[in-house]
Image (cartoon, grey):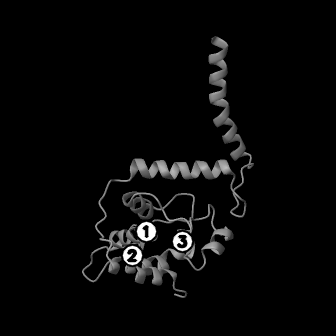
């Protein structure tokens, strides 16, 4: 039993020490043009999924999924998000480019399945160690001086969570080529 406990403790200490040594010696890949390993991808997705599930406050989405709001979401997404996350016209190409590390999800090909409040939390705070910057406060203030960032983020979330069931006019705008 004593040898087992000693082996267990040595194992627990060796793993983080080995990871630290590999990082300190420069053995870990840090360049963005390398393909991440399956383990690295799984760990990053797990960390983001669990952090969103644990930390995102259960807020109700204040934006109704009306055709007008979904159309505003399409325009917002195409103007501010599609440069990284793609759209139906460039999704396949965008997914194969790997211009950011890790590559952002192409929502036209892989619609998000997280609840509204988790998507809001992710977009508002961004994602560390990725190209996903925070959108909290990034949309500025309206004429009355009110910060409209939360409203814009919720509008994008409302659109994203309904990608599979867009009304015909909104779907046509989503699939339309050009700006």
Q: Nearer the viewer, mark 1 or mark 3?
A: 3
Left or right: 25, with 134 as reference point: right
What is the spatial separation of the Cα atoms under label 1 and label 3, in whole angstroms? 21 Å
Work out whether mark 1 precedes mark 3 in sequence or the reverse, and give the earlier one: 3
74 relative to 141 in the view: left or right: right
- In the structure shown, which secondary structural element does the residue marked by tag 3 occupy? loop
- Asked if residue 65 lies left or right of residue 125, the reply is left
Mark 2 / mark 3, whichever is N-terminal: 3
Crowding at label 1, few (<14), some or many (≥20) Cα neighbours within 10 Å?
some
Q: Residue 65, how many percent across, how many down?
A: 33, 72
Looking at the picture, tell me which residue is in the foreground, 114 or 143. Answer: 114
The answer to the question of whether label 1 and label 3 lie on touching residues, with beta carbons closer than 8 A, is no
How far apart, in angstroms, are the residues tagged by discs 1 and 2?
7 Å
Residue at (47, 48) in percent of width and height? 50
Label disc, if present, on residue 135 of the rendered structure: 1
- Residue 92: give x, y in percent of width and height: 64, 73
Q: Which mark is residue 63?
A: none
Residue 137 seen by the camera: no
Residue lying at 44% horizontally and 57% vertically, measured from the top left: 114
Task: Tell me the SS state at disc 1.
Answer: loop
Judged by depth in the image, the label closer to the viewer, 2 or 3, is 3
Q: Position of residue 62 (x, y in %)?
A: 28, 67
Q: Is residue 7 above or below residue 176?
A: above
Question: Taking 72 as reference, is 97 left or right?
Answer: right
Q: As drawn, which residue projects farthest toward the top?
A: 1
- The reply to whether the C-beta atoms of the residues labelled 1 and 2 are less than 8 Å apart is yes
The N terminus appears in which quarter of the rendering? top right
Q: Tell me the distance, in whole angstroms, between the alpha carbons under discs 2 and 3.
A: 24 Å
User: Residue 68 appears at what percent x and percent y?
Assistant: 33, 81
- Residue named by callout 3: 108
State the residue at coordinates (39%, 62%).
120
Q: Which residue is the site of mark 2?
A: 139
């Amino acid at each position: 039993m004593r040898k087992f406990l000693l082996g267990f403790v040595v194992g627990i200490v060796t793993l983080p020490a080995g990871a630290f040594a590999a990082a300190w010696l420069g053995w870990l890949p840090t360049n963005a043009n390398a393909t991440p390993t399956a383990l690295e991808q799984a760990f990053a997705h797990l960390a983001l999924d669990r952090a969103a599930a644990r930390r995102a406050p259960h807020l109700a989405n204040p934006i109704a999924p009306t055709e007008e709001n979904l159309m505003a979401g399409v325009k917002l997404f195409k103007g501010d998000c599609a440069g990284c996350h793609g759209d139906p016209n460039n999704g396949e190409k965008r997914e194969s480019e790997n211009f950011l590390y890790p590559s952002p999800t192409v929502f036209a090909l892989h619609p998000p399945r997280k609840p509204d409040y988790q998507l809001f939390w992710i977009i508002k705070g961004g994602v560390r160690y990725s190209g996903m910057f925070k959108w909290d406060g990034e949309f500025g203030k309206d004429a009355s001086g009110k910060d409209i960032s939360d409203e814009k983020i919720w509008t994008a979330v409302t659109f994203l969570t309904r990608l599979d069931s867009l009304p015909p006019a909104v779907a046509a705008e989503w699939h339309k080529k050009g700006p």
